Amino acid sequence: MSLINSILTWVMKKRIHDIELFMKYPHEVQHELLTGLLEKGKNTEFGKKFGFSDIKTYEEYRERVPVQTYEQMFPYIERLMRGEQNILWPTEVTWFAKSSGTTNARSKFIPVTTEALEDCHFKGGKDLISIYINNYPMSRMFSGKGLAIGGSHQINEFNPSQNSYYGDVSAVIMKNLPLWAQMIRTPSLDVALMDEWEEKIEKMARITMDQNVTSLSGVPTWTILLLQKIMENKGVDNIKEVWPNLEVFFHGAVAFTPYRPVFRSIIPDEEMRYVETYNASEGFFGIQDQKNSDELLLMLDYGIFYEFIPFEELENENPKVIPLQDVELDKNYAMVITTNAGLWRYSIGDTVKFTSLSPYRIRISGRTKHFINAFGEEVVVENAETAITYACEMTHASIDNFTAAPIFFEGNAKGSHEWIIEFKTPPDNREEFNQLLDKKLREINSDYDAKRYHNMALVPPTIHYVEPGTFYRWMKKRNKLGGQNKVPRLSNSREYVEDILAMLSQLST
């Protein structure tokens, strides 16, 4: 295995030069990419409709093609799923990434072209390792196996006779991985892609607990479940007793900060490394490229052209949209992408903040539909996670999951926020935790603070402390276990909060 380690390490490091190139010339790379995408898509149905052949500049593209929501793109995607081709992209589309539907109640299906797999998702995976090896040249991760926790896939029910499939993006990627990548991962695909999540966790634990696992990849929530199952099976106190050579966890999908104390208890190793990625159904967007910062380098040569909508413009009928070169530091932007999967000016639903403009680095700040703004307070996911992390630190607590929603005005009663929190370690003092959470939110969000001033519009939040396993049971009830599925952190409606409270009420009777 040492020879494989040496060869792969050498190959991965060669990519660093290309990354440095787009960091140095970001606008030129993005301009060239948009030109190529328009050329590739000009003879598709969508390209002909909007006259891609005549578009010569970004400004013409912005004026001619409207920003697309999923609902607007779905008629095209549905036809693709039924077997029609050359609608959004010229090459054949046989794979679709099924999103968890966190922006609305129903699932979304995103086309995954060969170009998107090769030049975006696979390239992102290779770059993740390249950057990691560049930062840690003494790494021995290739001396063992990489354990990846993914979702599942199934035959496309809209077109079952055409070898067409859909599933979690992690499953789509795993199923199509090149041979060399399959050789260095575990467990086998027949287990990794199982659709019965509880059985899959059990099998993954039994198979991998006696292997030499050196790296982990996955969503923190489900990774914790697997590690706990392995420790239970082995009868050990921490995972390093099982995998002494484990050195890195590549994670994404949810903010990691609230989970960090849990991982420290499961993996009590100061040398353990945690590397964040920003990989979604629609594409691979960012990689944590610095040792001592959780900022994400925006990857600019993956066949994705980026635009941004300032957060304050989101509710406008014709919001202002700006290219990469016009963004500013520390402002919330909704991300709009044009991709080599045939997504044209598609509003992905995520919001980001730029932490650096040279090179372009970001932090994920939330979702365009995952916020609370019932009273003009504009609380985004980043605010909620910062506040709950602070309250946990000050009260020696650690969380498993949470969600929050508004309590609307009713009669003479003032508004508020209602939180449901499941702890790994409960706080020393619940009242203190509640006060600290509210206090921190006021510190970091001036709009929330203004509404809380003298309880004029908002009174202190209502916080429910729920039993361990509550969110697991709720996700299972909704058939949302595993894969890319994650608990919606914030909602401007009470749909999720009331569903959880109703479930708890039924359990107590």
Image (tube, rainbow, N blue to C red):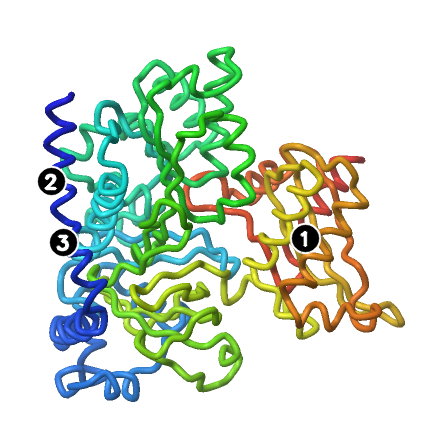
Q: Position of residue 223 (x, y in %)?
A: 45, 33
Q: Which mark is residue 497?
A: 1
Q: Position of residue 16 (x, y in %)?
A: 17, 50
Q: Quadrant of the C terminus?
A: top right
For this rendering, which residue is in front, 258 or 415? 258
Mark with earlier residue (2, 1): 2
- Label 3 and label 1: CA atoms lie apart by 48 Å
Q: Residue at x 54, y 58 (%)?
A: 382
Mark with earlier residue (3, 1): 3
For this rendering, which residue is in front, 327 or 489? 327
Q: Which mark is residue 449?
A: none
Q: Amino acid at mark 2?
A: Val
- Please tell me whether mark 2 or mark 1 is closer to you in this view: 2
Q: Amino acid at mark 3?
A: His
Q: Position of residue 452 (x, y in %)?
A: 77, 68
Q: Amino acid at mark 1?
A: Val
Question: What crowding class fits label 1: few (fewer than 14 Cα within 10 Å), some (14-19), or many (20 or more)?
Answer: many
Question: What crowding class fits label 2: few (fewer than 14 Cα within 10 Å), some (14-19), or many (20 or more)?
Answer: few
- Is residue 28 positioned above or below 116 on the image? below
